[in-house]
Image: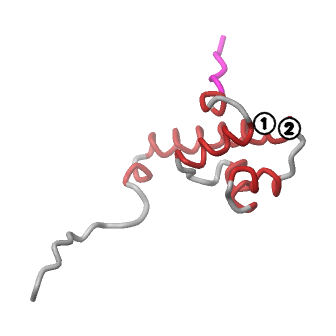
Amino acid sequence: MPTTGKTSTKRGRSEVWTRGPTARAIKRELRRVGVRLRELRQERGLTQEQAAEAIGVHPKHVIKMEQGNANFTMATLVAAAVAYKVPLRDLFPEEEKAD
C-alpha cells in the first residue's frame, strides 16, 4: 500500500475541554467576552445582523458569541475589535476584585 506522506491526525474537540478546571475557566471567559461584545454592540446601536455584517460572520454566530456559546477564533476577535473600533484588549474585561 503506497503512502501519501500524510499522517493521520485526530480532528474534533480539543483535549482542553476534557479537563474540568480548564473547561470551566474557558466557559467562564467565553461568557465574559460575550457580555462585553454585547455591550459594545449595544453602545454602538447595532443590531445583531448589523454587527454580523461588520464582523464578517453569520448573525447566528453573533448570538452564540454574545451568549458565550461560541469558541471564536483570534481572527473573529480581531474582526470584532475592528468593527467596534476598540483595541483588542477592550474585548477582555478585567475581573472584578472581591473585597
Is residue 98 a member of the stretch shown in magenta?
A: yes
Is residue 24 a member of the stretch shown in magenta?
A: no
Q: Nearer the viewer, residue 43 or 66?
A: 43
Side (left or right) of 71 relative to 1: right
Q: Which residue is mark 1?
A: 40
Q: Secondary structure at mark 2?
A: loop
Where is residue 56 shown, x and y percent of the image? 68, 56
Q: Nearer the viewer, residue 20 or 16?
A: 16
Q: Nearer the viewer, residue 82 or 6?
A: 82
Amino acid type, residue under disc 2 in the picture: Arg
Q: Secondary structure at mark 1?
A: helix
The region drawn magenta spans: 93-99
The residue positioned 82% from the left and 57% from the top of the image is 49
Q: Nearer the viewer, residue 96 or 57?
A: 57
Q: Which residue is mark 2?
A: 44
Where is residue 18 shown, x and y percent of the image? 41, 53
Side (left or right) of 16 relative to 63: left
Judged from this view, the residue extending furthest toward the right is 45
The residue positioned 20% from the left and 69% from the top of the image is 7
Disc 2 and disc 1 in contact, CB within 8 angstroms: yes
Magenta residues, dominant SS class: loop
Side (left or right) of 59 relative to 27: right
